[in-house]
Amino acid sequence: MASTEPERHHKEEDDAPAADDEDTGAQVAPIVKLEEVAVSTGEENEDPIIDLKAKLYRFDKDGNQWKERGAGSVKLLKHKQSGKVRLVMRQSKTLKICANHLVLPTMSVQEHAGNDKSCVWHATDFADGELKDELFCIRFASVENCKNFMETFQEIAESQKSKEENKDATAAADALDKLSVGDKKGKEKADEEVHAAVKGDESKTDEEKKIEEPASST
């Protein structure tokens, strides 16, 4: 009598479900097609001058204490057209803005007392969507990074001051130039009027001049 075991074994293999990693050859179309979205950071028209990792604090006047604002990357960005420089800092994970303000000629940065890895400065900040006067303190991982930040920040503030002075000087020179041109045109116009009057008087006949002359009193 012939054994039926091989046939049974072969049948069991046919009935067995396909393994998870077995390629069945079926083509499954995606349920939702995702479009690539371009994300704008607002920094496309700016060139980075400095980009350092740090932790930022703001001084809470009501509580009279420092409060952590976020840890992430602090950047100094220069606008390609206007040349203005702003400070932007985002939190490392959420990318939430924790500082956003222009570096102005009136600003100065100083080392935080008792910590050579930290420095402080005042700014009118726009991180929360409205202008606020803030006292910031930023702490770096090394003394070198802190010095680099302070020196770059101060150089930018000084350069912005020079730009403002040059702008004021240019505006004053333009005003003087316009005033000089106006005076010159006024003088030329007056000279033309006098010349026209003299020329008109010379063209008059002797009879016309006698008529215009007042009668002498006897």
Image (tube, grey):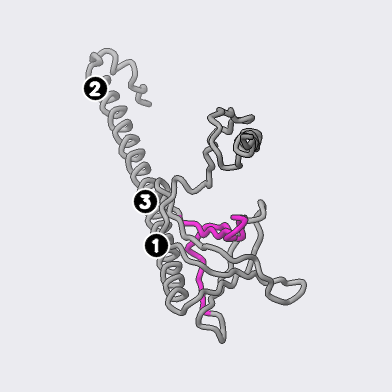
Q: As drawn, which residue projects farthest toward the bottom?
A: 114
Q: Residue at x 57, y 57 (%)?
A: 100
Number of the front mark, 2 or 3: 3
Number of the front mark, 3 or 1: 1
Label 3 SS: helix
- Checking the image for residue 170, the label placed there is 3
- Quarter of the view holding residue 1: top right
Q: Which residue is mark 2?
A: 199
Number of the front mark, 2 or 1: 1
Q: Earlier in the sequence, mark 2 or mark 3?
A: 3
Q: As drawn, which residue projects farthest toward the right?
A: 62
- Checking the image for residue 65, the label placed there is none
Instruction: Answer few, some or many: residues within 10 Å of disc 3's Cα (few below 14, many 20 plus, some between 14 and 19).
Output: few
Instruction: Answer few, some or many: residues within 10 Å of disc 2's Cα (few below 14, many 20 plus, some between 14 and 19).
Output: few
Q: Residue at x 55, y 60 (%)?
A: 89
Residue type marked 3 = Thr
Instruction: Answer few, some or many: residues within 10 Å of disc 1's Cα (few below 14, many 20 plus, some between 14 and 19).
Output: some
Percent coordinates x, y for residue 78 in the rendering: 43, 54
- Quarter of the view holding residue 190: top left
Task: Give whichever of 170, 66 is nearer the camera.
Answer: 66
How far separated are the C-alphas under marks 2 and 3? 43 Å
How far separated are the C-alphas under marks 3 and 1? 16 Å
How far separated are the C-alphas under marks 2 and 1? 59 Å
Percent coordinates x, y for residue 147 in the rendering: 44, 76
Quick check: is 86 in the magenta stretch?
Answer: yes
Percent coordinates x, y for residue 50 in the rendering: 43, 62
The stretch of residues the image draws in magenta is 85-111
Percent coordinates x, y for residue 53 in the rendering: 50, 67
Q: Is residue 97 above or below residue 176?
A: below
- Checking the image for residue 159, the label placed there is 1
